[in-house]
Each structure stands twice: as structure tokens, then as C-alpha cells.
Image (cartoon, helix red, strand yellow):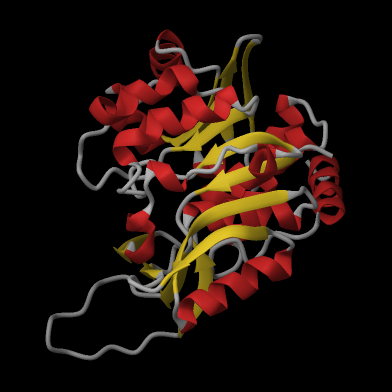
Amino acid sequence: MDGIYTIGGIVLDTLVRPLDELPPWGTAHNVESISSHLGGNGAATAYAAATLGVPTRLAGQLGHDSAGDWVIDRLRSSGVDVERVVRRAEASTAQTIAVARSDGERILIQDIGASALWSIADVDMSRAATDGSRFFHYGSPFNLTGLRADAAEVLRLAKKAGLETSLDVDWDPRGEWIRAFEPLCPYLDYLFLNQLEAEKLSGSRSPGDVFAFFSERGVGTVVLKQGEQGCKISHEGGRLHAPGFDVEVVDTTGAGDCFCGGFLAGLCRGLDLAEAARLANAAAAHCIERAGNSEGVPDYDTLRSWCVTQSSSR
């Protein structure tokens, strides 16, 4: 079976929920739960893909601390190959405080820690690193700050190594958006982004305009994530829409990462674009039904059976 080679953030998430309004400074407030979870766009995507039975290799940076120990154990338990995850004594493991409302929407407060230490010299595209992989997946180029200026070169090296490339956008804390992102486009076979990211990059909310914008810049397949509406896809063979699933929302943290892991896992397992999109929507749906990043994603056979059940009940 084809595999996935992923780089991106590896984070210890602390989830606080529910909190519909931030309390005034200087006060105390009780919530239902505060819990720890695996997070980061690289780690969560890799975790979801590995849980779905696809050989998955993750590269990233962690601190030599208890948070890093917890995260690496969680990744190993899912079957992710973490041989290229580097432990750094001079920095702490990246951590995020995720504060979720009762409707599942959240804000993220981040310390990117060791993730900031990535440099182009740390990117391994040797045969040993890429062997068995079909895809090279790049977690957000905006959050790996040490690689930010070299993101296009990373993708070029992946293409040179014979890999298909994919990338999930995420938020740009510097606000540069398309000025920083445009050089990456010619090297992208698959681009994943949500509605807000698409608007920030292209200047339009119209899916047609978004698809045309990235096609003109050399992107192969554009996957527009639309939450409960599912996703829309533009590729060289045309366009398609995969409807979402109606599930109870507990926490939206990590839904986009699970979507990417599910989509790539589906392609690695031989599904066509429409089937891979449906699997991705199902992975995201299972994620948001539980608190935490990627916690709810089941094994491949269970998820495929659930998709069939959902189809027959409509």
C-alpha cells in the first residue's frame, strides 16, 4: 500500500470546554473539562492516516520534556513512524490552549516552541525517508516559522524525489497570505483549505473564483473544506461536491487535519476522488463528535462501514 510522508506541527493540546464567553480579567471560572490531546497539523494528519491503516511517516521537532514524551508515545501507539521526529534540548514542545464554545467552535492560543527550529537543512528527502510513500504532505507552511521562507523549496525537493505533494493552509499569523503563499502553488498537486483561508488567499468567497485563482497559479487539485456542508473539489477532470454528515458537534479542533488524513488515506487505499472525499468528511465528522484533536477517528473498515450506513439511511 502507498504511504504518506508528513511534516508539520507536533503539539500538546490542552482543551478547555465549554466556555461561551471569556470571563473578566482577575476572576475565576469553572468549566466542565480540561483535557490533554495530541495536536498540531502534522501530528493530527499523520495520526488520522495511520489509524486508517496507511503507512505514515512523520517528521518534526519536539522538546526534551514530559510534553514531548506524551506526544511521541501517542503517535507511536497509532502506528506512526516517528524515526524522523527530532528531540531538541534547547526548546520546549509546542503547546496550544484550545478554548471551545458549547457549539464546538474554538480559539487557539499557541506557543510553537520547538516547531520554530525547523530549517531547510532538517528536511530529509533521501530515499530512506521517502521510500514507500506516495504523498508528501506539508502541514501549514505559516506555522513552521523556520521553514516559512523555504516552503517552496521543500515542495520542489519533494517533487524531485518523485512524491505527489499536498498542503493544508491553516491561519497566517503574520497576515501575509498570498504574498507568502503564491510561490508554493506550482509545486502543489493537492491543496486543502477552508472557506476563510480561501477568501484570505484569493480575495473571493465564491468556490468558482477560488478554483480558478489557484488553477491559474499551477495548483493541480483544490479541495475546499466547507464544514457541515462537506467539501468541493476542482481537478483536471472537472468539479465535484461531497456532502457532509449530520452529527452532533462537541469540538471542531482538528477536524480539518483529520479530513486531510482521511482524504490522503483514501487515495493511498485506491479510492477515487469522490470516495476519498467522502471518507475525509466521515473522518472529520467522527473527530468533531468527541473532544480533542483526532480522538474519534476509527479504523478504516469501521469508517467505511459507517459511510455505507449513512448512505443507506438517507
User: Residue 311: x percent and y percent?
Assistant: 81, 40
Q: Looking at the figure, which quarter contains the C terminus? A: top right
Residue 13 picture location, percent across and down? 45, 70
Residue 248 in view of the camera: no
On screen, residue 103 above or below 208: below
Is residue 250 or residue 95 the one in the foreground?
A: 95
Picture coordinates of residue 312, whole percent (x, y): 85, 42
Residue at point 53%, 73% (across, down): 37
Residues 74 and 193: in front is 74
115 w.r.t. 148: above or below:
below
Position above or below: 191 against 70: above
Q: Residue at x 34, y 49 (%)?
A: 143
Image quadrant in which you'd find residue 221: top right
Decide if residue 293 is on the left or right side of residue 186: right
Name the foreground residue: 230 vs 16. Answer: 16
- The answer, for residue 67, to whether it is visible in the render is yes
- Specify the quadrant that holds the N terminus: top right
State left or right for residue 224 relative to residue 287: left
- The residue shown at (31%, 64%) is 110
Residue 223 percent coordinates (x, y): 54, 29
Residue at 58% from the left image edge and 46% from the top image edge: 6
Q: How many marks?
A: 0
